[in-house]
Image (cartoon, helix red, strand yellow):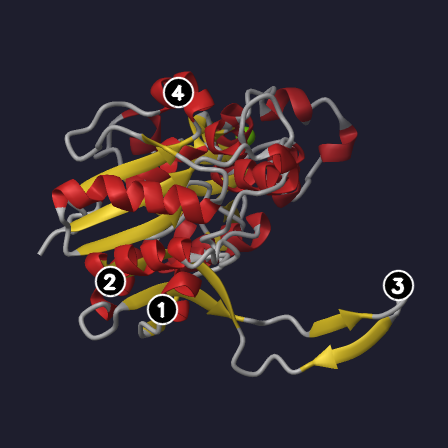
Amino acid sequence: MTTAALIVAAGRGHRAGGAVPKQYAPVGGIPVLARTLGIFLDHPQVDWVLVVTNPGDRALYEAAVPAHPKLLLPVAGDETRQGSVLNGLSALEAKSPTRVLIHDGVRPFVSPATITAVLDRLATADGALAAVPLADTLKRAGPGDTVAATLDRTGLWRAQTPQGFRFAAILKAHQAAAAAGRLDLTDDAGVAEWAKLTVALVPGSDANRKITTAEDLALAEQMHASPHIRTGQGFDVHRFAPGHHVWLCGVKIAHTHALDGHSDADVGLHALTDALLGAIGEADIGTLFPNTDPRWKGAASHLFLEEAARRVRARNGSIGNVDVTLLCEAPKIAPHRDAMCTRIAEILGLARDRVAVKATTTEGLGFTGRREGIAAMATATVILR
Ligand code: MG
């Protein structure tokens, strides 16, 4: 059994505006058509991929689409979509595939699972198409901007592609439709239905959207543009002073000493604040919250961390994960680890599994080994869009 994918990309796409037809417009730096082709070329059940193009787009096609052993030479499209598909099917006859998947070049977000599901359905149906049940209420417009009626949406689905068929059956159906002058059928399932083939609905996904307008293109760019991942690191030390408790990672812990500092001296949150500020290339905590400023005298350090998070969001960023290591001989951190992670997650508005706190001694070596103070280091990742 062999399978061909026929990608229809002959439209001029003027609705999307722009300098090039929409199938050649970049999303995240990669042309829409190249994204679409990549999914079919990578699919293990697809043996050949053939694209129907507009002859005027030859240079665009060659620039957008790299050579691939499964990729056949493109075929020229026709005035209508139906005619373009028939040209493609006729060209595929030489390969005589068992099955063919017909897909819009401007649906670059189809999932491999949807392709597999459509192919699987062909075991017992002549045709199968990806589709989603209609979720919105349907209105029929009356005069002006008025509503004439609310329609029953029960049993209604929105047709997508891929639409898969047994090859011989769909080729014959397209030839018959063309011979009968039926050039008004808007999709290949429609051609199959007209020819009395059995066609099944396969649940698709809303993500499998068609890029038709400039708005679709902007939305796709927003959703799929490659994010920039940044990392930052922070390090801090505070010395012990007389007292009965320390603040570490937002948690108050009874201890033989306190930590000395202008604020509450939470060395863990200070290191983490610097890690976040570092990830977005901003000034460090000492510059933003100088210890000469009376406003920060005895301040709770979650204020600093919240400000760093606010600055991340102001750059349209989100925090990927944060990781803090405390270096000390005492107090014992393990009993407080979970509370520390929960508190940091709360301050930053993160899921708990994006936060880690751990601790180590320094084997009695150095200032932390001599119990003169506590050190902390932290890393953070930030995703900028
Ligand atoms: Mg500090």
- Residue at image position (53%, 40%) is 220
- Residue at image position (68%, 39%) is 298
| Residue at which label 4 appears | 58
What whole-number distance in Å separates the C-alpha atoms at marks 4 and 2? 30 Å
Q: Is residue 193 left or right of residue 242?
A: left
Q: Is residue 385 left or right of residue 363?
A: right
| Residue at which label 3 appears | 145
What whole-number distance in Å separates the C-alpha atoms at marks 2 and 3? 44 Å
Q: Earlier in the sequence, mark 3 or mark 1?
A: 3
Question: Percent from the top left, x then y, of residue 16?
Answer: 62, 35
Mark 4 residue element = helix
Q: Amino acid at mark 1?
A: Ala
| Front position among marks 2 and 3 | 2
Question: Percent from the top left, x then y, of residue 72?
Answer: 21, 32
Q: Amino acid at mark 2?
A: Ala
- For the C terminus, which image quadrant? top right
Residue 359 showing in the rendered view: no
Within 8 Å of ligand 1, the CB of disc 3? Answer: no
